[in-house]
Image (tube, coloured by chain):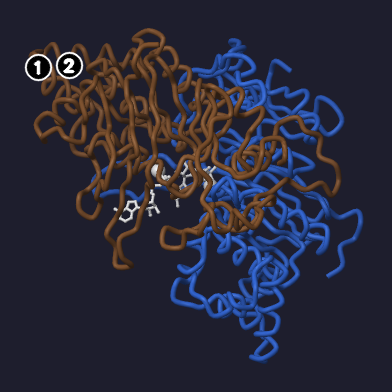
């Protein structure tokens, strides 16, 4: 597949995923959980886009829906110009090798009963390479590419540390030369002393293999380090989208500002400014009227309680969903 | 100087496992001053939770065994108290917030009932007074509509609210010492900031001392006056937070600080984060000599065979490394 220069690698248009809770006998149907509620963005080849937001705001659901690991409620996703939601399952399968995912918890994302070597041969087998010897050789190469050694080949997942196993997850994701890798909190479950190793590995692979990342994290520090552009999500919606510099130097949405202010700062040892954000995130099944952030927003006005602010461009490539900007 | 609230001397804890008796905490000593917030940091599995649970004798014995040590609280050695005396102490003089707020609340009781129970056990209040006091405490930790919250079950609350309930419970009897094991790890940064501010205010109001366990150095910088750094069951560095974070002496502390991406550092293309190589050693594979030597960029021959003793850098700082300060 050749990526033409002017077609974005990934284009997401008004993507929605609602979960309908199971209806209990004689009870009324509960309202749907609006996990992803109409998000749009594009990812150019070679670019890294960060997706950041609080727990439960829909980051993982967005990732899994746009890879069509779960079916969307509505919206469009095109990958190199192909609309994924029009494809049949068999067509989707052959495209999948180009779009891979790395999960947060390395232990639950591999089969505990299979040896590491086998786990790494699977992608080749699934995509029709049956030559056992060749697959084993490729698996060994992959181990080396992610900083493990051939003697990990015959080990079982429980014999590896979290960091080593996350390397296996990364090796599996890059096995078939993907164009896009979605990394869903790839370092959150790892020890602090191991996180930097994995981030460096992902950066090296990007340089060497020409991969584009959608990088999901709730850690603003990691996102800033890793990403060219950043999308900030709140309750299923993107509330701000801009390049890293804009997000970190001149955040516009009050939620983005609050996130940045709340990060404990190692250097200064003081929160930049006492957080003025009170209260909790509303339930995604019973969204607030108006702007979803208004109950916690320090600058809200009357309009914010009544209307939903649209995502609009306030400067080159800088999108914000706030009436007051 | 007044005597410390808590004084832990040479605490050593092991576990009996199928692989033999493994030492999780290998002779640590530290103290907690009155009105101070002390942070305990270190990699996963280094023994932070085991150390904290030992203070209140909350470890399952067996498999756990406290091999040696003293835990002095008001001049009393907690390790020699009987079960009844310990029970009286827990929740009243020394309280603990556990690492996992989901599992430490009873799912079938309302949070009001659970709060009141704690108060009834440790005070002379009647039920009505206990419920009233519970609502006060919920207000204190800034739970919205506290009266109503009394009737809620744990699953009806968000993670941040549950954590605030845990804090309210721990504070019910105005303890002198609060041990908080990763109190904000499961929370978002916004809620985390609220909880840290809350703990800091409560400390100032009541004069209690806090031992906070965390792996987040940002949280340390935010709330702690002093820091203990643990590695593989031992304390490898301790000192005032500011000084330790600005000028770490131990290579492990230095590596930890360097590997955290800092906000506002412009990324140069191709720039890599500084990393600590290697992996965290498991309990049955603790390296000889200095336990950190296989991962240490500065290790010399001596580090492989000889265990460095804790030494005094100045009146308030200690570290254990064979190398001279300034050479790393
Ligand atoms: N299979 C499901 N059925 C019902 N609700 C779901 C399902 N999966 C996710 N949700 C809900 O959708 C919302 C978004 O969840 P999601 O896992 O995408 O959040 P997230 O941003 O990845 O959070 P985290 O940072 O905790 O991983 C949450 O309210 C969650 O409870
Ligand atoms: N009941 C037990 N039986 C056997 N080993 C145990 C038991 N509880 C803890 N350990 C071991 O003791 C060591 C120290 O564990 P501890 O829970 O104190 O780590 P920690 O520093 O709190 O780590 P984390 O940051 O992951 O919470 C670990 O290696 C752990 O596996
Ligand atoms: Mg997620
Ligand atoms: Mg612990």
Q: Is mark 1 within 8 Å of ligand 4?
A: no
Q: Position of residue A302 (x, y in %)?
A: 58, 10
Q: Where is residue B251 in the image (x, y as percent from the top left)?
A: 63, 43
Residue at horizontal 87 percent and vertical 31 percent from the top: A316
Left or right, B211 with respect to A84, comes to left
Instruction: State yes or no: discs 2 and 1 in contact (Cβ < 8 Å).
Output: yes
Q: In the figure, A284 relative to B147: above or below?
A: below
Q: Nearer the viewer, residue B53 or A224?
A: B53
Is the C terminus of chain A in the top left, top right, bottom left or bottom right quadrant? top right
The tint of chain B in the picture is brown
The tint of chain A in the picture is blue
- Say which mark, if any, is on residue B131: 2
Quarter of the image for residue A232 reads top right
Q: Position of residue A174 (x, y in %)?
A: 70, 67
Is the N terminus of chain A in the top left, top right, bottom left or bottom right quadrant? bottom right
Residue under pointer 1 = B127
Q: In the figure, A303 relative to B313: above or below?
A: above
């Amino acid at each position: 597949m050749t990526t033409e220069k002017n077609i974005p690698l990934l284009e997401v248009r008004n993507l929605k995923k609602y979960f309908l809770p199971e209806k209990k006998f004689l009870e009324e149907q509960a309202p749907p959980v609006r996990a992803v509620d109409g998000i749009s963005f594009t990812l150019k080849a070679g670019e890294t886009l960060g997706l950041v937001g609080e727990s439960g705001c829909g980051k993982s659901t967005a990732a899994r829906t746009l890879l069509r690991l779960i079916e969307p409620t509505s919206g469009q996703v095109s990958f190199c110009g192909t609309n994924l939601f029009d494809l049949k399952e068999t067509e989707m399968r052959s495209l999948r090798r180009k779009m891979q995912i790395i999960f947060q918890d390395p232990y639950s994302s591999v089969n505990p009963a299979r040896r590491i070597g086998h786990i790494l041969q699977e992608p080749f087998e699934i995509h029709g390479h049956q030559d056992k010897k060749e697959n084993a050789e490729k698996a060994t190469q992959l181990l080396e590419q992610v900083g493990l050694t051939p003697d990990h080949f015959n080990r079982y997942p429980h014999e590896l540390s979290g960091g080593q196993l996350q390397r296996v997850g990364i090796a599996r994701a890059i096995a078939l030369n993907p164009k896009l890798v979605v990394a869903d909190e790839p370092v959150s479950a790892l020890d602090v002393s191991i996180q930097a190793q994995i981030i460096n590995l992902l950066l090296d692979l990007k340089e060497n293999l020409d991969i584009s990342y959608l990088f999901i994290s709730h850690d603003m520090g990691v996102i800033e380090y890793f990403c060219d552009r950043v999308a900030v999500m709140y309750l299923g919606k993107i509330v701000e989208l801009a390049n890293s510099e804009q997000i970190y130097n001149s955040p516009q949405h009050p939620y983005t500002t609050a996130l940045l202010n709340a990060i404990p700062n190692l250097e200064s040892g003081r929160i930049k400014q006492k957080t003025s954000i009170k209260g909790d995130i509303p339930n995604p099944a019973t969204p607030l009227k108006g702007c979803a952030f208004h109950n916690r927003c320090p600058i809200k006005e009357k309009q914010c309680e009544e209307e939903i602010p649209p995502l609009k461009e306030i400067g080159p490539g800088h999108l914000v969903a706030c009436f007051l900007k | 100087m007044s005597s410390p609230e808590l004084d832990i001397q040479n605490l050593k804890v092991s576990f009996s496992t199928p692989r033999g008796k493994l030492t999780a905490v290998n002779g640590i000593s530290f103290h907690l001053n009155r009105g101070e917030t002390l942070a305990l940091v270190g990699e996963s599995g280094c023994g932070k939770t085991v150390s904290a649970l030992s203070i209140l004798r909350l470890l399952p014995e067996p498999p756990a065994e406290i091999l040696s040590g003293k835990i002095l609280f008001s001049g009393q050695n907690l390790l020699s108290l009987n079960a009844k005396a310990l029970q009286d102490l827990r929740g009243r003089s020394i309280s603990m917030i556990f690492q996992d707020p989901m599992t430490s609340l009873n799912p079938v009781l309302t949070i009001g009932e659970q709060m009141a129970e704690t108060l009834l056990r440790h005070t002379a209040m009647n039920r009505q007074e206990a419920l009233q006091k519970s609502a006060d405490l919920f207000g204190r930790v800034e739970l919205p509509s506290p009266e109503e919250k009394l009737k809620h079950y744990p699953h009806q609350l968000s993670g941040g609210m549950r954590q605030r309930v845990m804090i309210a419970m721990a504070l019910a009897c105005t303890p002198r010492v609060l041990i908080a094991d990763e109190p904000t790890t499961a929370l978002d940064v916004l809620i985390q900031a609220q909880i840290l501010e809350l703990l800091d205010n409560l400390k100032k109001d009541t004069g209690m001392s806090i031992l906070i366990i965390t792996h987040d150095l940002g949280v340390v910088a935010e709330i702690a006056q002093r820091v203990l750094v643990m590695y593989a069951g031992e304390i490898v560095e301790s000192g005032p937070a500011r000084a330790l974070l600005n000028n770490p002496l131990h290579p492990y502390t230095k590596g930890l600080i360097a590997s955290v991406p800092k906000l506002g550092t412009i990324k140069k293309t191709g720039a890599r984060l500084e990393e600590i190589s290697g992996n965290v050693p498991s309990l049955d594979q603790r390296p000889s000599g200095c336990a950190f030597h296989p991962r240490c960029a500065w290790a010399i021959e001596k580090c492989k065979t000889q265990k460095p003793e804790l030494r005094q850098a100045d009146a308030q700082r200690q570290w254990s490394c064979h190398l001279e300060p300034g050479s790393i």
